[in-house]
Image (spheres, helix red, strand yellow):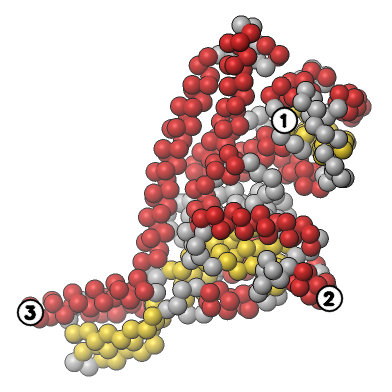
């Protein structure tokens, strides 16, 4: 398993880009989210060195900064190969860890994983990260017949096999969990709930928006028990607060809606890492409506890039309509809001601008959710007066919006509901008619 940061562990952050100016804001946020105390930042613009990733001279500079700051780790905002990791580590004082971008993300995931499902997904990602490194050790050991060649660690021919077997077992367990989750989603739809998913980059304000939309009832996707497990969804200004999923009930006009907050997107994630969290993302792919939440206070080019990446992820498997929500409007003046809305019109032609923190335009968003969800059907049922009739009427009240009920020789009830609920109500009415006819 990935080694975790100790609280306040000192680190030097390093980043290389082939051209342009290296941006370090996100990697610094990630380092702080993992609990590191960043003592220095080293950046370089040059083509990748196959042996060290950075130029060898820059690695020596990093080593000096490590000594000067008494750091115990170096975080590299790039993906390092196993040999590059070893070569950099060989330039550093003994005991100083080398952590690339994806190992850092795995550390954060591991810290935030609270449920069995999230823990399995983190372990799966860690094993997928480790597998090519184990394969590299195996390949070199077989070729050179030197255990521990290049300092990669002593070759254990069973390690690669064990990793693959564990990956297979985790996939099987996650598949069983997902079948349970899928069954829960189907039950909720049959009970008249519309399913809305919040998607978007981490720190866009999804958890805060969930709290704004949520009613008193609390439903947790990761639990087998019913509502009121937690009184609030966690809402903090830090990365990866939401690793699993949190689902809460929201009253949207005359509809019963369940809104699910999912793990936030993050830039430049490799396919193997995204795939490890496939079962969590299914909450997005299988929703009736997706709210793509964007931090409108960010630079417009950054927003555009995130929208493009989000669309690539969502449209790959998602069939539900997507509504872009430009959040954090309280941090931007009206003129800038209008400029950004126009600049993003091709990617977000009809966005909803809100401030989840202040509540601005949240009611407008509720109305938009109602408009975008599948239309309700109107139904009028005539039920015979039997011993079971009132239980059916009560069920319809619980699962539909009842417009009128009249009582006489028969019970006449008019209501609006999802198609699945209308179909169930007709089936229940038919059973009552058959029961009444046989008496």
Which quadrant would residue 37 be assigned to in this image?
Answer: top right
**Is residue 26 or residue 219 the one in the foreground?**
26
Residue occupying image coordinates x 70% and y 48%: 267
Which quadrant would residue 290 be assigned to in this image?
Answer: bottom right
Find disc 1 in the rendering and name its residue. 80
What quarter of the picture does the N terminus occupy?
top right
Structural distance between the alpha carbons of marks 1 and 3: 77 Å
Instruction: Work out whether mark 3 precedes mark 2 in sequence or the reverse, and give the earlier one.
Output: 2
Structural distance between the alpha carbons of marks 3 and 2: 72 Å
Structural distance between the alpha carbons of marks 1 and 2: 43 Å
In the rendered view, does 119 fall on the left or right side of 82?
A: left
Find disc 3 in the rendering and name its residue. 439
Q: Position of residue 53 (x, y in %)?
A: 79, 29
For the residue labelled by badge 1, is the local secondary structure a helix, a strand or a loop?
A: loop
Find disc 2 in the rendering and name its residue. 335
Q: Position of residue 270 (x, y in %)?
A: 63, 41
In the rendered view, does 228 fall on the left or right side of 237?
A: left
For the residue labelled by badge 2, is the local secondary structure a helix, a strand or a loop?
A: helix
Instruction: Work out whether mark 1 precedes mark 2 in sequence or the reverse, and give the earlier one.
Output: 1
Which quadrant would residue 390 be assigned to in this image?
Answer: bottom left
Residues under numbered marks 1 and 2 in contact, where contact means CB atoms less than 8 Å apart: no
Most extreme residue toward the top is: 145
């Amino acid at each position: 398993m990935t080694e975790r940061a100790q609280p306040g562990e000192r680190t030097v952050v390093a980043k290389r880009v082939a051209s342009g100016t290296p941006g370090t804001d996100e990697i610094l946020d990630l380092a702080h989210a993992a609990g590191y105390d960043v003592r220095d930042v080293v950046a370089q613009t040059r083509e990748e060195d196959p042996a060290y990733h950075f130029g060898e001279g820059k690695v020596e500079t990093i080593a000096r900064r490590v000594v000067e700051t008494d750091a115990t780790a170096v975080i590299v905002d790039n993906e390092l190969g196993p040999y590059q990791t070893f070569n950099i580590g060989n330039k550093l004082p003994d005991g100083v860890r080398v952590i690339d971008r994806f190992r850092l993300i795995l550390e954060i995931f591991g810290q935030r994983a609270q449920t069995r499902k999230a823990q399995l997904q983190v372990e799966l990602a860690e094993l997928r990260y480790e597998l090519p490194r184990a394969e590299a050790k195996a390949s070199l050991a077989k070729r050179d017949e030197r255990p521990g060649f290049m300092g990669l660690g002593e070759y254990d021919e069973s390690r690669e096999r064990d990793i693959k077997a564990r990956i297979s077992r985790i996939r099987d367990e996650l598949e069983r969990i997902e079948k349970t989750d899928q069954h829960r989603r189907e039950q909720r739809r049959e009970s008249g709930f519309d399913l809305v998913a919040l998607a978007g980059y981490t720190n866009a304000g999804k958890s805060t928006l969930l709290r704004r939309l949520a009613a008193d009832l609390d439903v947790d996707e990761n639990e087998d028990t019913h509502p009121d497990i937690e009184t609030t969804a966690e809402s903090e200004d830090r990365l990866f607060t939401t690793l699993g999923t949190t689902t809460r009930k929201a009253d949207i006009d005359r509809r019963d809606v369940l809104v699910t907050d999912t793990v936030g997107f993050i830039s430049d994630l490799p396919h193997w890492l995204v795939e490890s969290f496939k079962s969590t993302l299914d909450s997005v792919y299988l929703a009736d409506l997706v709210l793509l939440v964007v931090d409108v206070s960010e630079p417009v080019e950054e927003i555009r890039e995130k929208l493009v990446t989000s669309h690539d992820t969502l449209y790959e498997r998602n069939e539900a309509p997507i509504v872009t929500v430009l959040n954090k409007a309280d941090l931007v003046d009206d003129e800038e809001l209008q400029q950004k809305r126009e600049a993003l019109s091709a990617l977000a032609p009809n966005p909803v601008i809100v401030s989840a923190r202040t509540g601005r335009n949240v009611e407008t968003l509720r109305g938009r959710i109602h408009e975008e969800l599948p239309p309700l059907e109107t139904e009028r049922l005539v039920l015979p007066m039997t011993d079971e009739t009132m239980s059916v009427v009560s069920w319809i009240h619980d699962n539909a919006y009842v417009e009128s009920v009249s009582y006489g020789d028969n019970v006449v009830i008019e209501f609006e509901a999802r198609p699945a609920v209308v179909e169930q109500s007709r089936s229940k009415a038919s059973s009552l008619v058959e029961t009444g006819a046989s008496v």
